[in-house]
Image (cartoon, grey):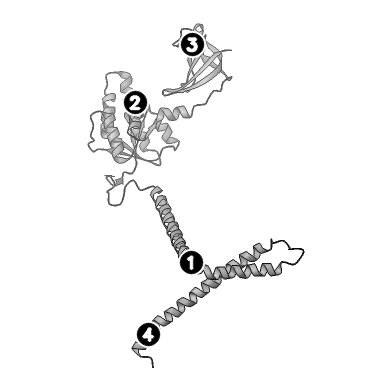
Amino acid sequence: MILAKDYFLLVPLAKGIISVRIKIILRLILALTFAVVASIFSQLIPPFFGSDTFLVRAFITLFSALIGFAIFPDIAGPIRVITVTTVNFLVHRVSSEVMNQLLKIPRLSNPLGNQVPQLGSVALTKPLILDTSAIIDGRILDIAKTGFISGLVLVPRFVLTELQQVADSSDDLKRQRGRRGFEIVEGLKKIRGIRVEVWDKEQGGKAVDDKLLNLAKGLSGKILTCDFNLNRVASVYNISILNVNDLANAVKAISLPGEELEIKIVHLGKDKLQGVGYLEDGTMVVISNAAEQIGKTIKVEVTKNIQTPAGRMIFGKLT
């Protein structure tokens, strides 16, 4: 029967025996490794005076095995340090790469805990906000019918107020455009896939453009407009803009240099020798040496296309 005092004596002894056996096994593994390497490279030894080199190779192999068995205690420490350092480096590198990839994952614009803006029962997440110019222009209705626009379309109250002022104008043309704007809004409500809501809340800002920018920034929305200046200001504040004019210019057919067109010369250009005409989509065509052809429809050869902030321009010459 083993007593408690004997147990405490036997445990360190057993640990010591296990440690010695592990060291011997590791020595044998290193000796075997050295022997295998030496055996492989000893095959390259040329014969001495025509004699067989077997004994020489065997001696080199055994000697290398003894070296491996003998130097294990000396290299055990460095091997342990190198191994631990390598493992730590790999773990740190992998964890850093995983964290970098997690940081690149796009976050929700509305983190948990922040209340999503509501309009009645509708959650306002990145809405499309209509500008007065886009409503009066009217093309937004045709674009919406094609399905290029969908989701929530927001019409601010201050935009409707400005539209009403246009509809009540003493100028007959402005009055017609304002009334047509209200018809456009009603038409958008009838399009499938679009939900039109009126933003009734007060919005900070003096002018309508300021209020639009503040509203778009607060709701992370996009402004639908035809106003070039509003487009420029919004880009400074990193606010997304959907400009109807940009879309119209993008889908216009491009006339390549050398192509022939029939153009009616309407008026003079900046140069008194130039004549100016327009394509059916409204693209301006400037023809050199066509000042005397005003009122006539002539054949023109396209020389170049220029994209300007105001739209695309075509330059040509008489054929």
Between the residue at mark 4 and the residue at mark 2, the CA separation in whole angstroms equals 91 Å
Label 4, on which residue? 9
Describe residue 32's horizontal placement relative to residue 214 as left or right.
Answer: right
Task: Tell me the mark number nearer the camera, choosing from 4 and 2.
Answer: 4
The disc placed on residue 100 is none
Between the residue at mark 1 and the residue at mark 2, the CA separation in whole angstroms equals 78 Å
For the point 52% across and 74% down, the residue is: 25
Describe residue 169's horizontal placement relative to residue 16 as left or right.
Answer: left
Label 1, on which residue? 74
Q: Amino acid at mark 3?
A: Gly
Q: Earlier in the sequence, mark 3 or mark 1?
A: 1
Q: Residues within 10 Å of mark 2 (few under 14, many from 20)?
A: few
Q: Earlier in the sequence, mark 4 or mark 1?
A: 4
Q: Earlier in the sequence, mark 1 or mark 2?
A: 1
Q: Quick one: quadrant of the N terminus?
A: bottom left
Q: Position of residue 142 (x, y in %)?
A: 42, 32
Front residue of this view, candidates 149 and 7: 7
Task: Tell me the mark number nearer the camera, choosing from 1 and 2.
Answer: 1
